[in-house]
Image (cartoon, coloured by chain):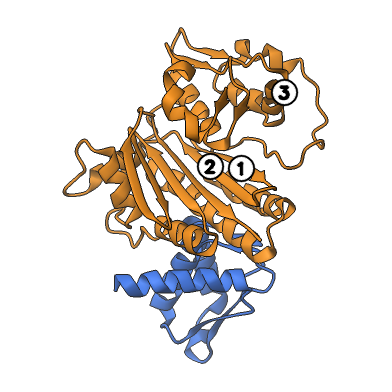
Amino acid sequence: MDIIFDTIYKIQSEVFHDHAVDLKRGTWLDPWAMGLVCLKAAEFKNQTNKQLILPSDANMLLYLKRMHLEQIFGEFTYKSFLKPLESIEINERENDNVCEIIHCIFRDELDARLGKINRMFLHFGLGEIEGSMTTSLVGELGNNVFDHNDGQWPTSVRGAIILAQVNPRQRRIEVVVADPGIGFKGSLAALSAPVKNDDLEAIKLGLSGVTGRIGEPRGQGLRIVQNWTINNFAGIVRIHSGSGLVIVDKNGLHAEPVFPIVGTLASFMVKYQ
Amino acid sequence: MLKFNTVLNGRPSAKEAASRIQQIVNGSAEREDVVLDFAGIEVLTPSYADELLRILRAKYGVDKVKTINTSEAVTETFNAVAALSKEAS
């Protein structure tokens, strides 16, 4: 069973149930689904009956090992469920096209990692200009995580979780930033006319440049993420925040209600030459 | 700018850099331009660019603050920030 963007919103009750993250039947996870898995694991972290059910598929376990899943799930106190991964030994240099999960707990870590992320994009095959611009987009999404959540993290998990994957055959790179924070709706709650109960409306406002950082000249970051992704890289921007999902591409904006998460998952997919 | 970092990201870092630049300039802007050299900069994020230029232009004037040796990617960042600032004003 592929657990990917195209399937996760149909099979979510099989993957996330009873405070369990259940990957048992998983044969593939894309960065979007992995981001959701990380956010749900953070959400369930303090539940006494929480569970992580690892896949039985050996290749999938190897893939999760290469992504350093046990490191972030160890931080989220799932250590007792990680034994199948801990027993695997891998050569880290076997597949350079797989990026490990990067958890930047503080802003300084994000700053420090961007240089490495830039080099990773160059290694993936992006040119210097494309790589630099793509790294800028990661920086903008990562900055937003700290700008809108510091002082307000809803759970004991904080920071930006960054995932990236290259598809060399389709010459496509997907970058996902998972944010276990207050979400678009929470961020815009500070406005004089706050968005009451609608995550979709909040995401649309955020994408249009409206910011919860009242009185500060901000709100450009997401607009540049959209402009560059769509106009420079023929790509797609996706945002899942609370119970809303918004997708923006050259054809316009598509919005639909989906299962709820604590925080926000934002991704951009770029095509390169 | 290379003396700050090769990757310039985020408003907090830009505020720090702007403060330091004001100390380095130390009054000489009355006679000379403030020239920011971006040679060797690998990544410039829009939020850094916006914050840095906003602070320095407010202090010294739009015409006094100049950028040189900007790579194509850095130029794209400045252009994107300028376009959105123009739209907002």
Label 2 and label 3: CA atoms lie apart by 22 Å
Relative horizontal placement of residue A128, taking residue B59 as reference (left or right): right
In percent of width and height, residue A69 lies at 64, 26
Please identify which colour was used for chain A in the image: orange
Vertical placement of B85 versus A163: above or below? below
Relative horizontal placement of residue A198, taking residue A147 as reference (left or right): left
Residue ID for mark 2: A176
Label 1 and label 2: CA atoms lie apart by 6 Å
Q: Using the rendered image of the protein, determine whether residue A104 is visible from the camera's viewpoint.
A: no
Of residues A72 and A175, which is closer to you in this image? A175
Of residues A243 and A49, which is closer to you in this image? A243
Q: Chain of mark 1?
A: A
Residue ID for mark 3: A59
Q: Do tag 1 and tag 2 residues touch (Cβ < 8 Å)? A: yes
Relative horizontal placement of residue A141, taking residue B8 as reference (left or right): left
Q: Earlier in the sequence, mark 1 or mark 2?
A: 1
Q: Chain of mark 3?
A: A
